[in-house]
Image (tube, helix red, strand yellow):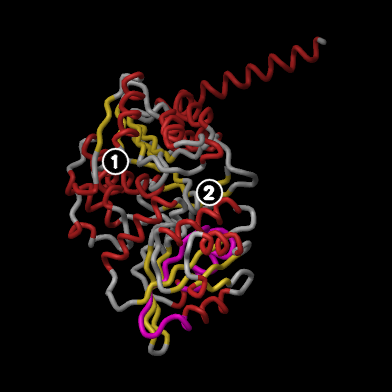
Amino acid sequence: MPLVLTLIFLLVGYGISEYFFHFRNRNSIPLRIHVNGTRGKSSVTRLITAGLREGGFKVLAKTTGTEPRVIFEDGSETQIYRPGSANIIEQVKFFSRARSRGAKAVVVECMALQPVLQWLTEDRMVCAQIGVITNVRPDHMDVMGETLEDVARALSNTIPLKGKLFTAESNSKILKQLEDECQTRSTEIVTCGEEEVSWDAMRGFSYIEHRENVALALKVCQSCGVESKKAFSGMVKAIPDPGVLRVYQIHFFDKDIQFVNAFAANDPDSTLLIWKLMGERMEPDRKKIVMVNARADRIQRSEQMGILIAQALKADAYLLVGDYTKAIEDEAIRLGLDGDKIENLGGQSVSDIFEQVLHHTPLKSMVFAIGNIGGLGQQIVDFFKHRGASDDRTVNRLGTGIEPYIF
C-alpha cells in the first residue's frame, strides 16, 4: 500500500510540474492564434503566419494538414514525424520549442476532432487570444454529431475566452450559433467573405487558393497590426500546404490535359466550390472528366461520392479508381447517372488509369480528381505532377539542415 501511494504522489507531482512548465512556455508567447474549422485550416494557418512574418513578427506555426509541419520564423519548415498515432500532446511540445526559439507569436492548427479534446486543446493548452473557425461543413459527423449544428457546436469548443473569433462562415443559422457561443465566452466575433478579395489579387498566388481563406487571414493580420497590403505580399510568397488545390498541365503528343488535384476537399460542399471555381476558368471546348478515388474502409464515403457525381458534377466521363468502386457506381446509377459514362477502374494501376484518361481526351480535357488522397490518390497526384508542369514553390520545402521533428 505505501508503494502504491508513493507512485500516485509521484504521478500527480509529475503532472503538476509538466503543466507548470507548459504554463510558463505558453505564457512566454504574447500572441497565440488557434485555427479550427472544417475546410481550409492548414491554408489559413499558413496564410496568417506568412502575413504576420511579413509584418515583422517572429512567428512559428504548426499545421496538421496533408503533411503535418512546423513552420519556422524564416519561412522554412520541417515535417513532423510521429512514431505512433497523432496526439494532442504535440501541441504542448510545440509550445516548448516555440519558447526555446524566442517566438513572439504562434499560429496553431487544431488537430483534435472529439469535442472534448477540442475544448481541452484550447482551454488548457493554447489559450488563444485569437480564434479562427474557417467554416462549418458536414464532415466527421461520426465524431462531431449528426447535424451541421452539432458540428458547429463541436468546433465552438476552440472559441477563446475574452478574445476574438474570426470566421468566413456564410450560413446565417450557423453564424448565429457561433455568435451565441462567442457571447457566452465574452468574445468578439469578426466575419468576412470572399468578396473582400478581388479575382485580380488572387492571380498573385502560384496555386489555386480560395478567396475566403485569404480574406480571413487578412482580417486576422490586420487585427494584429499588420497593414493589409504588407500582409498580402507575404501570403503570395509563402510555401503552400502540400494538399492545396493545384492544376498540372500535361501535354501528351497532341492531347492537352489539365489535372486538378481536388483530393483534399473531402466533403461535398468544398468539392462543389472547387468544381464551380474550375468551371469559371475552363474553356468551353475542354472535355470534363471526373476521377473518384475510393477506399475499402470508407464505404459510406464512397456512397456519398456516388450521390455527388450523380446529382452535382455533370461531366463527360467518370473514372472510378481505387478500392470498392462498386459502391460509387451502384449509387450513381441508382440515382440516374448514365452508366455508359462510367468507367469502373477499381484495382487498376496508375498507368492503366492514365491510358483511360487519354482515351477520353479527344484534344483537350480537365481531369477533376476527388475522393481520398490516401493510397492510390497520392500515387495518381505524383504521376500527373511528374508528367506535368506547375508553378510549384514547394520543391525546397524543408529548411536547409533541419531534421524532421519527432513528436
Q: Quadrant of residue 315?
A: bottom left
Residue 391 position in % (x across, y down): 33, 69
Q: Amino acid at mark 1?
A: Ser
Badge 1 element: loop
Looking at the image, do the residues carrying marks 1 and 2 touch, with CB atoms under 8 Å apart?
no
**From the viewer's perspective, is the residue at label 1 or at label 2 nearer?**
1
The picture quadrant where one finds residue 179 is top left
Q: Is residue 80 left or right of residue 315?
A: right
Q: Is residue 370 magenta?
A: yes
Q: Which mark is residue 251?
A: none
- Which residues lie in the magenta part? 358-384
Indicate left or right for 86 with 137 as reference: right
Residue 354 vs 121, above or below: the answer is below
Front position in the image: 306 or 200? 306
Camera-nearest residue between 278 and 4: 278
Secondary structure of the residue carrying tag 2 is strand
Q: Amino acid at mark 2?
A: Ile
Identify which residue is drawn at 82% across, 10% down: 1
**Measured from the top left, where is residue 153 in percent x and y?**
43, 30
Quote the CA–CA distance across marks 1 and 2.
33 Å
Along the viewing direction, whichever of 10 and 51 lies nearer the viewer: 51
Residue pointed to by mark 1: 170
Q: Is residue 143 visible?
A: yes
Can you see residue 126? no
**Where is residue 42 shown, x and y percent of the image?**
41, 48
- Bin the neighbour count of mark 1 within 10 Å (Cα to Cα): few under 14, some 14-19, many 20 and up: some
What residue is rendered at 43% in x and 52% in y? 268
Residue matched to label 2: 80
Quarter of the figure with the C terminus: top right
Taking 115 as reference, is 258 above or below it? below
In percent of width and height, residue 375 lies at: 59, 61
Q: Residue at x 38, y 48 (%)?
A: 40
